Image (cartoon, rainbow, N blue to C red):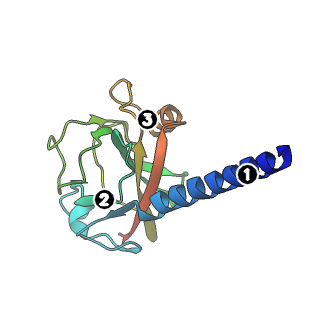
Amino acid sequence: MNTQNAVRTHLFLMILILVTSVSKSQTASTFKLVSSAFEDGKPIPAKYTCDGSNISPPLSWMGIPQKTKSFAIIMDDPDAPMGTWVHWVIYNIPGTVTGLKENLTVQIKATDGLNSWNQKGYNGPCPSYGTHQYNFKLFALDETLTLKDGMIKAELLEAMKGHILSETTLTGLFRN
């Protein structure tokens, strides 16, 4: 009888692990960030860059994990000559929000971080040479972060540790 119970317990644990891993992978694969202005891996229109109005593009997301309390967005350029250049840091976007309109200013209650220019808000693509990729990273978090206003990317990433339910990336290209 002990052997049967041990086998049942082992089998139950194996099924539990399998179900947990399947649900996590489904959440990760269905959480998606898109823009009506450009497709993933395609050029970002000049309107959203230093060649145009330099306004944030419209963004929307779907497949939100169930326990999401807030979102954070980091937009950066890993192709910058002096290392990754941060263009946008915004966090504590309410978990009920499913997108941001073009030219985000105060459309929602959220907290602006500092970009690599040491400024709050969005600062669009403006490469000095060649084609650069710009990664819009969206993080679904299990809490609203209690952070000061004006965090930099590294501080935000540190504060999000252990609170990221899922993340997704939309990549756009731009050439000056």
Q: Disc number at residue 63?
A: none
Residue corresponding to mark 3: 152
Task: Evaluate if marks 1 and 2 touch, with contact meaning CB atoms under 8 Å apart.
Answer: no
- Report the Cα–Cα distance between label 2 and label 3: 23 Å
For the residue labelled by badge 3, is the local secondary structure a helix, a strand or a loop? loop
Asked whether 94 or 43 is in front, the reply is: 94
**Vertical placement of 54 versus 171: above or below?**
above
Q: Is residue 128 visible?
A: no
For the residue labelled by badge 1, is the local secondary structure a helix, a strand or a loop? helix
Residue corresponding to mark 2: 61
- Identified by mark 2, the residue type is Trp
Tell us which disc is closer to us: 3 or 1.
Answer: 1
Residue 35, percent across and down? Answer: 27, 66
- Identified by mark 1, the residue type is Arg
Which of disc 1 and disc 3 is earlier in sequence?
A: 1
Task: Evaluate if marks 2 and 3 touch, with contact meaning CB atoms under 8 Å apart.
Answer: no
